[in-house]
Image (cartoon, grey):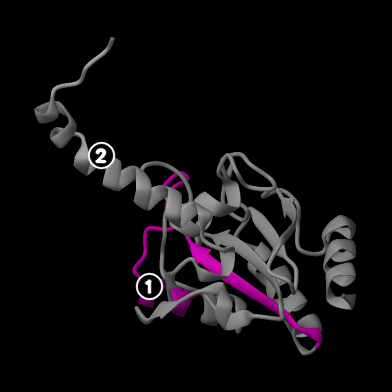
Amino acid sequence: MFRIPLASLASLAPLALLIASLVSISAAPLDQIPFKTMDGKESSLKEFAGKVILVVNVASHCGNTPQYAGLEKLYRQYAQQGLVILGFPCNDFGGQEPGSNDEIKAFCTSTYEVTFPILDKIHVKGADQSPLYAALSGPEAKFPGDVKWNFGKFLIGRNGEVIARFEPGIKPDSPALISALESALKK
């Protein structure tokens, strides 16, 4: 028979609490996972209930940065039909988003006239990965696997379920993305 001394069990309590909290975050509905706005206010996807959401990790100094123009064009074209684009600045790939939230906001508005929400800078991979991205890309996700680079995209339907994932090289005007987006907006 295998016996564990009580003192050993007590030392495992903090680990058990950590595991339980991680399980509860990943088990939480996607729309209830918290994140922060660029102004530091708490938010979640619940704020956009009933909308089609395109979640994109963005960066200001990347070869994909011109995709901001395409994202803004999509937003202006489809916002009235229920599209929301959420840009999450991320410095995880080659240090291509080194700026502060204020610098990022100024760049996005002055260079690309971005009007869709740009949120607080986060981590989309690694030990400090945001809970939202853990749910979007983790092992239990519909489309699991690490985000590969800046401008990876997740399309979420009006019902809060992830519909599609588009890798960074897929531009906002690609036929596959447009088709998936238009299909989601019709539902």
Nearer the camera: disc 2 or disc 1? 2
Place of residue 50 in the rendered image (x, y in percent of width and height, measured from the top left): 71, 81
Q: Name which of mark 2 and mark 1 comes first in the sequence.
A: 2
Q: Position of residue 70 (x, y in %)?
A: 73, 69
Q: Where's the C terminus, which quadrant?
A: bottom right
Which stretch is magenta? 81-107
Magenta stretch: includes residue 92:
yes
Report the residue at 63% width, 42% height from top: 144
Q: Residues within 10 Å of mark 1 (few under 14, many from 20)?
A: some
Identify the mark at residue 15; answer none if there is no mark. Answer: 2
Which residue in the protein does label 1 denote?
101
Drawn side of residue 174 relative to residue 6, left or right: right
How far apart are labels 2 and 1 at the CA level?
Answer: 34 Å
In the picture, the disc for residue 79 is none
Q: Residue furthest top?
A: 1
Q: At label 2, which amino acid type do we have?
A: Leu
Front residue of 37 and 118: 37
Instruction: Classify 10 Å Cα crowding around label 2: few (below 14), some (14-19), many (20 and above).
Output: few
Q: Which of the 4 image quadrants contains residue 116?
A: bottom right
Q: Residue at x 84, y 70 (%)?
A: 184
Q: Secondary structure at mark 2?
A: helix
* Residue 96 seen by the camera: no
Residue name at image x 64 percent, y 68 percent? 68
User: Is 82 left or right of 124, judged from the image as shown?
Assistant: right
